[in-house]
Image: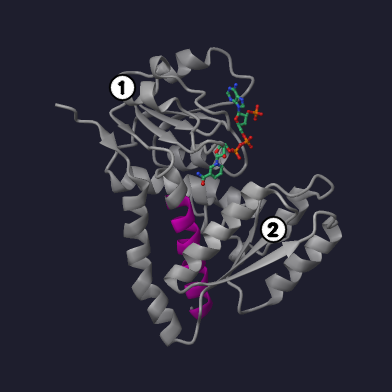
């Protein structure tokens, strides 16, 4: 019998969104409409699609969503000005600057300008630092989604060896920190890592956050490993080779329908959390 678990992101996502509905109603009854502003700079079509998906998800749930689309020639100063206005606008609870921004902009400086209490995607160094120390309000949404999937399916982390492939500030590093805080033993790999397949072979849990289509192969996995694929590449493929990894894994996220929808749900949840904090 096939005991494999497909870690169904749609199912996890539906669960999270159902829990948010009464909270949003309660906020509205108190005169607060949770509100997320996404800032898109330039014309990158994938970014535009992500922003649209986030906006649609907000509206479906009754969260106010505003999209600010700035031209591709926008300077760092102009972007900082927009962010500061949003920081000062008490009707805005969450600010999301869509990554990547055009190369003339200092993206780090722009991220740092977001007020901590509105940093619903954990992009500021304060937000990241607090996440790493274990008391962050809003971890980055994709890492938070990965932990939510793990918890939804009751996957044990304590004492397990987790190998994270990727160390970006919004994904690999914070997910490594979240796993470490949950008492997993974490190995974080990157483009300078030697013997990657041998390291992955030791993993009870593999998190793929590489940005390379079908990069991780099934024969690199230990039999029964749990595979969480954060990758989302053109052609709707993840960072793991699904067919061969499916054979070896005890549980695996599909792409699409795995980490992606839960990431959006975490953004919605963090926006609602931020709105609730304005009442306290
Ligand atoms: P990124 O900033 O490009 O980072 C990729 C990481 O992979 C880097 O740390 C890089 O190492 C590492 N890497 C590259 N080649 C490698 C190799 N040969 N061996 C080992 N490590 C290697 O990407 P990201 O923003 O973290 O995104 C990663 C993936 O997740 C992408 O597919 C992206 O589309 C997806 N993503 C999905 C969601 C979602 O909602 N599902 C959200 C965000 C991102 P260095 O640090 O040494 O360069």
Q: Could you say where residue 182 lies in the image, as x and y percent from the top left?
A: 39, 41
Q: Is residue 273 left or right of residue 194?
A: left
The answer to whether residue 245 shows anywhere in this view is: yes
Q: Can you identify the residue that label 2 sits on?
A: 40
The residue at the point 59 percent across, 44 percent down is: 170
- Residue 67's quadrant in the figure? bottom right
The residue at the point 72 percent across, 63 percent down is: 69
Which range is magenta?
Answer: 262-279
Q: Could you say where residue 3 lies in the image, as x and y percent from the top left?
A: 19, 30
**Image color mode:** one colour
Q: Quadrant of ligand 1?
A: top right
Residue reaching furthest front? 235
Say above or below: 61 vs 252. Answer: below
The residue at the point 49 percent across, 67 percent down is: 58
The residue at the point 52 percent across, 36 percent down is: 235
Q: Which is the main secondary structure of the residues drawn in magenta?
A: helix
Q: Is residue 189 left or right of residue 251?
A: right
- Residue 52's quadrant in the figure? bottom right
- Residue 136: within the magenta? no
- Residue 75's quadrant in the figure? bottom right
Q: Could you say where residue 144 lies in the image, as x and y percent from the top left?
A: 46, 49
Q: Could you say where residue 186 lies in the image, as x and y percent from the top left?
A: 46, 30
Give the numbered dot on residue 36. Answer: none
* In the foreground, 252 or 184: 252
Give the numbered dot on residue 247. Answer: 1
Query: Could you tell me which secondary element the residue under label 2 belongs to?
Result: strand
Query: Quadrant where the N terminus lies?
Result: top left
């Amino acid at each position: 019998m096939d005991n494999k678990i497909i870690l169904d992101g749609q199912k996890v996502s539906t669960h999270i969104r159902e829990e948010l509905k009464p909270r949003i109603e309660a906020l509205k009854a108190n005169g607060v409409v949770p509100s997320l502003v996404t800032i898109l700079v330039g014309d990158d079509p994938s970014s535009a699609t992500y922003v649209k998906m986030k906006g649609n998800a907000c509206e479906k749930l009754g969260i106010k969503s505003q999209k600010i689309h700035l031209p591709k020639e926008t300077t760092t100063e102009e972007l900082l000005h927009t962010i500061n206005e949003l920081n000062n606008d008490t009707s805005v609870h969450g600010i999301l600057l869509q990554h990547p921004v055009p190369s003339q902009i200092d993206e780090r400086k722009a991220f740092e300008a977001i007020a901590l209490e509105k940093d619903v995607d954990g992009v500021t160094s304060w937000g990241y630092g607090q996440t790493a120390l274990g008391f962050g309000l809003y971890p980055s949404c994709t890492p938070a989604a990965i932990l939510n999937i793990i918890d939804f399916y009751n996957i044990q982390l304590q004492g397990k060896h987790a190998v994270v492939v990727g160390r970006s500030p919004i994904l690999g590093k914070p997910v490594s920190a979240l796993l470490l805080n949950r008492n997993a033993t974490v190995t974080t790999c990157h483009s300078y890592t030697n013997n990657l397949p041998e390291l992955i072979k030791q993993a009870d849990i593999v998190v793929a956050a590489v940005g390379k289509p079908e990069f991780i192969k099934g024969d690199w996995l230990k039999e029964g490993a749990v595979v969480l694929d954060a990758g989302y590449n053109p052609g709707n493929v993840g960072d793991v080779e699904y067919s061969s990894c499916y054979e070896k894994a005890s549980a695996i996220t599909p792409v699409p329908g795995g980490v992606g929808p839960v990431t959006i749900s975490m953004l919605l949840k963090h926006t609602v959390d931020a709105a609730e904090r304005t009442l306290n």
